């Protein structure tokens, strides 16, 4: 299978601190790949580099063989590489459905002027986005809250809304930063199933996650970061047995690897 | 559940249309009829009201920059430049006033691209302060150019007739000295109505949604593929176009330009009009400008105490309606809300303790948001 | 050249004090206090009035004029500081606090600040307040310090004693304020508040009390510097807003909400105002200097919004 995304010895320095240090790996189409590592390992930074929210200090990211680093984030999103945020980032004063409709922006056929004068294309978009938003909300179990203010949603649903926004952009690769954080076991398992369903829709999913149980269940492959450096890569079974990984996690007493 | 939003928005449309027709009737027929009752006393209101209409236009521009999340204290720049660009085109180049006003708007929006490219990256106070300084710079520029006569008296003729290009068919007759006040009144209210209709359309189209997403979280918007730089520039350019045109008409109405036509004070005033009207409603700047300007005008018999009373009234208004005059509408909705709907809201708030309809939620929100996401936007501005 | 630099330093010290008060209020409350310049004018005219009421007392006691002047001025200065602190505290307690609590947007305070600025602009020139005229105090100390042949220029260097005295006082106030912020408990509490309100609250800092103290201090600094400047130049009752704008600019140059930045900003602007006209004079462009200074600052801030010392995005 061909690699849809290639990360090539990418490095990010913040002053003296090297947050990501020469990390390389590839992602195959329709794969679910998790990036794990202790707090501050550079996982979120890696995602920001891939989605081009930050410029790498060195190295590059290729999407379908073409370089996407150093391009504006909205252009990278347009090409199909879309991230969600680690923090619960939402548009506070919009309803859930409005939010998802806005997130359809990339699919619009009309331009700004078209929307202003309401051309047939624009009206078409409008209707299409509404239907598609309904469908996405249905898929993620948010239908009953479509008309709620986003800021009033409980935490678990906010995560889902984040994913809904990502989906609405019609991405090829979705980067999820800690999508299960703050969920209880049941909610997590539901969300895991949801991510699997994403793949069925033809998406490639990259995710950062601390919940090891979820990671081990869901991932095809795992990349492990520690202090910005890749220390391991492989299937969940391989990672669980990897001495370097165990070492890295034992260094942090509050984390446990395994089930 | 699914039907409700439709009926509500349908109702809103009808109420809006009725309000528009009423307002147009009032502006085009009601007020001239009232003034005709006693022209000697009342005809000065033509000038006052056209001033208000033009200033509310400029405020609408400020409101639009608010809508993309920027506090703009620089509208005075574009009003001042608009007035001078039109004046120079008319006096030095013999252009017809009506065309010159459009050129004023176009040049102002081109200029806004140049200025906007660097400064629209700034947010919060940073943008506010840089735009504030820009007003000062504009004043100094006008004071130092020969073409603006160093910002001293720059006399303008009344607008000439506008004919259809290539024909002799008169679209707008030439303004006479005596009739200019009335002429400007109709021109100003027409422009004002066009501006606010345009703004309403903009805000209620997808562009408005995009602007709103920008206002609330630029990073998130760009992760969804929104070209935030472009959108900001477009919104700012529209704002400056409106400011430039308003300035051109305001200057022509005064028939005499000088540097104190629009100062830092005016830039701040535009902001106040927006605040006072309310930032959540398109008509906010209109209501704010009318209230404050007309109020200011009515206080003029108090002479020495005019400013003091005005300031006190502002402070008292801030206490009663800290979220602007239009927040009255929200309060009203709360009272007149349909009983079954109210019940539903209550049951919803019972379900989730986070959700409260009343004011307390609005107050709590910033705090909880800051607590759960210390790195979010709020801290950064 | 020495003259230019000395003047720049002198103006800079005054400006720094104005900016300090403003940045303190901004840092603590996120309020752009449009009335800051009006506070400054209030201080100036208040000090002027007090001075004129009590200066004859000193003469009556048979003091030498300069001693009487200085003692009287010190009394007037202290009275001004106390009065302005009181005014500032009242403003915070009864106006800003209420509006901040009631309104749903931070920016509403801008409207309130502008309204208070209007109010002061209206009240100060009234007949029964200070009247419409500009005022300045006579030089506190006669004579001046001069060097006939300075090292770097042909014209003699000249600095009135009263300016030296006032400059010294300004520096003393700055140092006192910095020491207060650095070494006292309230000072530290305010810095904690400015840095992170919620964290400070969790650590047990009494937010309301220290916010009020901060606003009072800010107004006090503005008033104090008004009292100092009124001994040097004429101050009119409506000069406030132009000082507000300058104060904003200085705060931005240094970095919004950063105390050290405000001082730097004050000195930078003071220096620029002194040096730029001198540099342009040979080309007959001196009247462009304001334009050049403001335009330069605008460009600087467009590309470095955090100013000299601020953190990015405050
Ligand atoms: N904008 C920035 N400026 C400076 N340092 C940064 C910046 N962003 C991240 N860092 C630093 O880079 C390192 C990696 O941060 P990153 O957020 O990528 O970690 P992470 O693996 O996502 O951690 P967590 O599991 O806590 O989310 C941290 O030490 C962090 O402090
Ligand atoms: Mg992270």
Image (tube, rainbow, N blue to C red):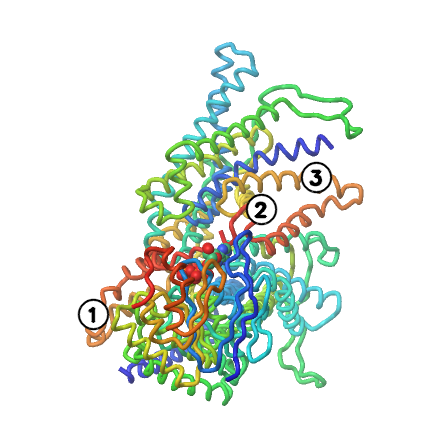
Q: How many marks?
A: 3
Residue A146 x/y as whole percent: 32, 78
Rendered-image quadrant of the N terminus of chain B: bottom left
Q: Residue at x 46, y 86 (%)?
A: A125
The quadrant where residue A164 appears:
bottom left
Q: Residue at x 69, y 73 (%)?
A: B96
**Helix, strand or loop for disc 3:** helix
Q: Residues within 10 Å of mark 3 (few under 14, many from 20)?
A: some
**Front in this rendered view, residue C87 or B361:** B361
Q: Which residue is mark 1?
A: B351
Q: Which residue is mark 2?
A: C308
Residue A210 x/y as whole percent: 36, 65
Q: Which residue is mark 3?
A: C275
Is the same chain shared between marks 3 and 1?
no
* Residue A242, above or below C163: below
Residue C41 x/y as whole percent: 51, 37
Left or right of A217 on screen, residue A231: right
């Amino acid at each position: 299978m061909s690699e849809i995304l290639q990360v090539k010895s990418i490095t990010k320095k913040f002053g003296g601190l090297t947050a990501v240090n020469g990390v390389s790996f590839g992602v195959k189409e329709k794969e679910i790949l998790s990036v794990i590592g202790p707090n501050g390992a550079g996982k979120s930074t890696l995602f920001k580099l891939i989605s081009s929210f930050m410029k790498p200090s060195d190295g590059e990211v290729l999407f379908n063989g073409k370089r996407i680093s150093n391009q504006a984030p909205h252009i990278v999103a347009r090409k199909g590489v879309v991230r969600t945020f680690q923090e619960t980032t939402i548009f506070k004063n919009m309803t859930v459905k409005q939010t998802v409709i806005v997130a359809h922006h990339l699919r619009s056929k009309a331009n700004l002027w078209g929307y202003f004068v309401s051309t047939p294309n624009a009206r078409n978009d409008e209707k299409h986005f509404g239907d598609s938003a309904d469908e996405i909300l249905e898929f993620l179990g948010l239908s009953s809250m479509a008309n709620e203010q986003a800021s009033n949603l409980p935490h678990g649903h906010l995560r889902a809304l984040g994913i809904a926004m990502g989906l609405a952009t019609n991405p090829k690769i979705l980067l999820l930063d800690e999508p299960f954080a703050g969920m209880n076991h049941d909610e997590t398992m539901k969300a895991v199933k949801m991510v699997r369903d994403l793949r069925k829709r033809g998406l490639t999913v990259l995710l950062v996650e601390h919940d090891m149980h979820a990671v081990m269940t869901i991932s095809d492959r795992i990349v492990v970061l520690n202090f910005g450096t890749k220390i391991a890569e492989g299937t969940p079974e391989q990672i669980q047995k990897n001495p370097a990984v165990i070492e890295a996690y034992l260094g942090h007493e509050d984390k446990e690897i395994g089930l | 559940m699914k039907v409700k939003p439709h009926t509500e928005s349908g109702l809103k449309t009808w109420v809006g249309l009725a309000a528009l027709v009423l307002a147009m009737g009032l502006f085009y027929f009601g007020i001239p009829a009232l003034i005709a009752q006693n022209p000697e006393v009342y005809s000065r209101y033509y000038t006052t009201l056209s001033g208000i209409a033009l200033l509310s236009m400029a405020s609408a521009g400020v409101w639009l920059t608010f809508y993309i999340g920027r506090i703009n204290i620089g509208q005075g720049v574009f009003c001042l430049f608009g007035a001078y660009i039109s004046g120079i085109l008319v006096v030095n180049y013999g252009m017809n006033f009506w065309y010159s006003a459009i050129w004023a708007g176009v040049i102002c929006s081109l200029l806004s691209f140049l200025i906007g490219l660097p400064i629209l990256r700034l947010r919060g106070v940073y943008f506010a302060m840089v735009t504030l300084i820009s007003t000062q710079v504009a004043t100094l520029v006008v004071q130092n150019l020969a073409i603006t006569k160093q910002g001293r008296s720059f006399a303008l003729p009344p607008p000439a007739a506008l004919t259809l290009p290539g024909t002799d068919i008169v679209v707008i007759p030439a303004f006479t000295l005596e009739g200019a006040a009335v002429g400007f009144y109709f021109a100003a209210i027409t422009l004002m109505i066009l501006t606010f209709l345009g703004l309403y359309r903009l805000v209620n189209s997808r562009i408005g949604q995009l602007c709103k997403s920008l206002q609330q979280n630029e990073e998130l918007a760009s992760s969804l593929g929104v070209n935030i730089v472009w959108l900001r520039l477009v919104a700012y350019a529209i704002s400056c176009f409106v400011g430039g045109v308003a300035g051109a008409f305001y200057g022509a109405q005064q028939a005499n330009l000088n540097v104190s036509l629009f100062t830092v004070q005016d830039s701040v005033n535009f902001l106040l009009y927006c605040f006072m009207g309310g930032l959540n409603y398109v008509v906010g700047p209109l209501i704010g400008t009318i209230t404050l300007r007309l109020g200011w005008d009515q206080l003029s018999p108090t002479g020495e105490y005019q400013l003091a009373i005005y300031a006190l009234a502002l402070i008292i208004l801030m206490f009663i309606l800290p979220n602007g005059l239009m927040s009255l509408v929200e309060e009203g909705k709360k009272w007149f809300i349909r009983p079954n709907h109210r019940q539903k809201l209550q049951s919803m708030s019972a379900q989730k303790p986070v959700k409260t309809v009343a004011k307390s939620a609005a107050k709590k929100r910033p705090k909880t948001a800051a607590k759960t996401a210390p790195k979010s936007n709020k801290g950064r501005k | 050249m020495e003259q230019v630099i000395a003047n720049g330093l002198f103006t800079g010290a005054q400006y720094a004090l104005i900016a300090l008060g403003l940045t303190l209020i901004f840092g603590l409350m996120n309020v752009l206090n449009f009335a800051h310049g009006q506070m400054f004018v209030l201080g100036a005219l208040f000090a002027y009035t007090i001075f004129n009421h009590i200066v004859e007392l000193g003469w009556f006691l048979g003091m030498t004029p300069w001693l009487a002047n200085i003692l009287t001025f010190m009394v007037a200065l202290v009275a001004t500081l106390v009065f302005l602190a009181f005014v500032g505290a009242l403003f915070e307690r009864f106006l800003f606090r209420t509006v901040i609590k009631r309104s749903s947007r931070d920016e509403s305070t801008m409207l309130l600040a502008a309204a208070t600025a209007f109010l002061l602009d209206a009240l100060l020139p009234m007949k029964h307040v200070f009247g419409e005229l500009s005022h300045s105090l006579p030089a506190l100390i006669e004579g001046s310090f001069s060097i006939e042949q300075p090292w770097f220029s042909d014209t003699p260097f000249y600095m009135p004693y009263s300016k030296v005295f006032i400059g010294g006082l300004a520096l003393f106030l700055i140092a006192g304020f910095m020491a207060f912020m650095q070494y006292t408990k309230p000072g530290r509490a305010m810095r904690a508040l400015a840095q992170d309100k919620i964290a400070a609250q969790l650590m047990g800092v009494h937010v309301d009390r220290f916010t009020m103290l901060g606003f009072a201090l800010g107004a006090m600094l503005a008033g104090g510097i008004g009292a100092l400047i009124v001994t040097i130049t004429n101050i009119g009752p409506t000069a406030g807003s132009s000082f507000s704008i300058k104060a904003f600019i200085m705060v931005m140059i240094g970095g919004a909400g950063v105390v050290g930045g405000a001082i730097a900003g004050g000195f930078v602007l003071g220096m620029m105002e002194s040096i730029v006209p001198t540099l342009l004079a040979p080309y007959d462009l001196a009247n462009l200097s304001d334009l050049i200074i403001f335009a330069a600052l605008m460009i600087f801030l467009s590309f470095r919004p955090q100013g000299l010392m601020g953190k990015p995005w405050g």
